[in-house]
Amino acid sequence: MCGITGVSVLDGAAARPAFDGLVTLQHRGQESWGVAVAGPGGVRVRRALGFASRSGCDDLPGGPAGGVAVAHTRYSTTGATLLENSQPFVHEAGHIALAHNGDLTNAAALRVLLGREGYAFRSTSDSEVILALLAGTGSRRDGIAAAEGTGGSGTGASEASGASGASGASGRVVAAVARAVRVLRGGYAVVCAAGDRLLAFRDPHGLRPLVAGFAPGRAAVASETCALDALGCSEQREVEPGELLILRDGRLEGAYRVAEPAPRASCVFEHLYLTRQDSRIGGVRTGATRVAFGERLAMESPVDADLVVAVPASGVPAARGYARAAGLPLAGTLVRNEQVGRTFIEPDRGRRERKLRNKFSIGSPVDGARVVVVDDSIVRGSTMRRIVTLLRESGASEVHVRIAAPPLVAPCHYGVDIVDTGELVAAGREVEEVCRIIGATSLAHLSVAGMRQTVGSVAGEGLCEGCITGEYPTPVDGARDKLRLVPAQAPRHATPPGALHPR
């Protein structure tokens, strides 16, 4: 779920626009942030824990000569919330900086192999595995650093599927990425600063999102189109699954297929919740898709009621659609504390529950009303239980809960921190039991068929529905431990926030 951006400019510095793009993706992660900029003197990186702040712009690395930059805002799915796990990661040789969104299902095995070949890991994040592979650990001629003119001979681009036409340093970069992709498993979208080039590539199934945009003298890649809009990139395209883009001097230098075609399986949770409402998937704003979810939900699960209450902010589009289809007024009853971030992505349970107590309040009374409260999803059930309690205390005679997504019943293995099935309130329970847990009068979800038909009509792409169906597009282990890469003797301290690391 992390947010990533990458920027290549013809003139000026890339660090500032990379940071600006990052700020628009803050909803995708709030544990840490970082910006790395590449220039003639190598790579410099600025990383800090917490939300990205404008004050952090004052000492961003780089300067006028830093024409390539990558940025990252973290939502942890592998590794604890420590600064050493914050991104971008920089290779010790100082030629590569990498930011990654997703989760690797074979990270533990690859980490062991790379360690045996001499790579010294400095984090417990699976993202550093990708960095080690791209750097050419275990093979002096295979890394991107060699392709960037640091002494390695590289191998021909013919080793990369679809890399015909790439030659010289670009050909060797394509081959290095193709070699890495052949051994990586799971979901990943990657942006990488390598010398004066910006690289962007995705896993063969397209599990994690990545888009590219262009403006005169500027090329950018990001997790969502809202970041490209903020950077003035009016010409936009998706980075295709299994595709590598090489950007240089503010333009597209080449596009190459680095993986064999695989069945499309983009994350359905992007449509349901993750992506910002003004971003587009398949050319359609996700806000419009969620309105359509709400309309479909009203058709599938009507109820006699007096008004519809939206759960702000992500539940508002679905509530608008439900109210319109049901012919009911939409009331702004719930008020959201804007100082509280997304509680779903808060990694610590205690902090999550404390934030939840301060997240919502009642803005207008609902004395005696029969209320339909609409939200985008139910994960743990704690948020909806709190909302139902508030509405009943405000005088609602009935509280009918309608969810614009099917029940979430299985873990995510590709980049959303849904690890423990025991945390999922719908797992192993009938709808009636969940209804009693949250204290509602009735509960209904959007059907799987309704979700598929709605998304299919606006996106026309295959979906990963693992969290809904328990069926995954790649082989996965039965269970996933968030701290699986942490050695038993590993220290649990963090580097002081905001440290500036020259490379």
Image: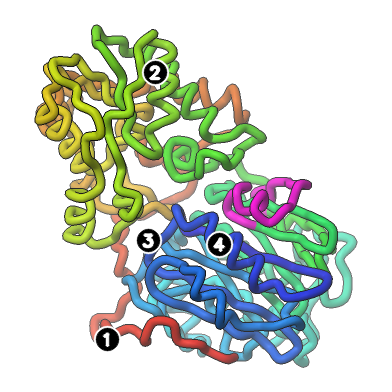
Mark 4 Cα-neighbour bin, 10 Å: few <14, some 14–19, many ≥20:
many
Disc number for residue 199: none
**Dividing the picture into quarters, in which one does residue 81 lie?**
bottom left
Closer to us: 325 or 281: 325
| Placement of the N terminus among the 4 image quadrants | bottom left
Residue at left offset 79%, top offset 57%:
255
Return the residue at label 4. Answer: 22
Of pointers 3 and 4, the one earlier in the residue sequence: 4
Closer to us: 457 or 399: 399
Of pointers 4 and 2, the one earlier in the residue sequence: 4
Residue 449 appears anywhere in the view? no
Of pointers 4 and 1, the one earlier in the residue sequence: 4
| Residue at the outermost front position | 364
Q: Amino acid at mark 2?
A: Tyr
Return the residue at label 1. Answer: 491
Q: Nearer the viewer, mark 4 or mark 1?
A: 4
Location of residue 280 in the rendering, given as x and y in whole percent from the top left corner: 61, 39
Residue 335 appears anywhere in the view? yes
Q: Is residue 261 left or right of residue 26?
A: right
Are circles 2 and 1 on residues that touch, CB within 8 Å? no
Helix, strand or loop at disc 3? loop
Return the residue at label 3. Answer: 77
Picture layout, residue 408 above or below residue 52: above
Return the residue at label 2. Answer: 322
Instruction: Give the distance between the C-alpha atoms of the residues marked 2 and 3, in whole angstroms.
Output: 33 Å
Q: Which residues are magenta?
A: 222-242
Picture layout, residue 71 above or below residue 155: above
**Dividing the picture into quarters, in which one does residue 106 lie?**
bottom left
Residue at left offset 59%, top offset 22%:
457
Are circles 4 and 2 on residues that touch, CB within 8 Å? no
Residue at left offset 35%, top offset 15%:
329
Q: Amino acid at mark 1?
A: Pro
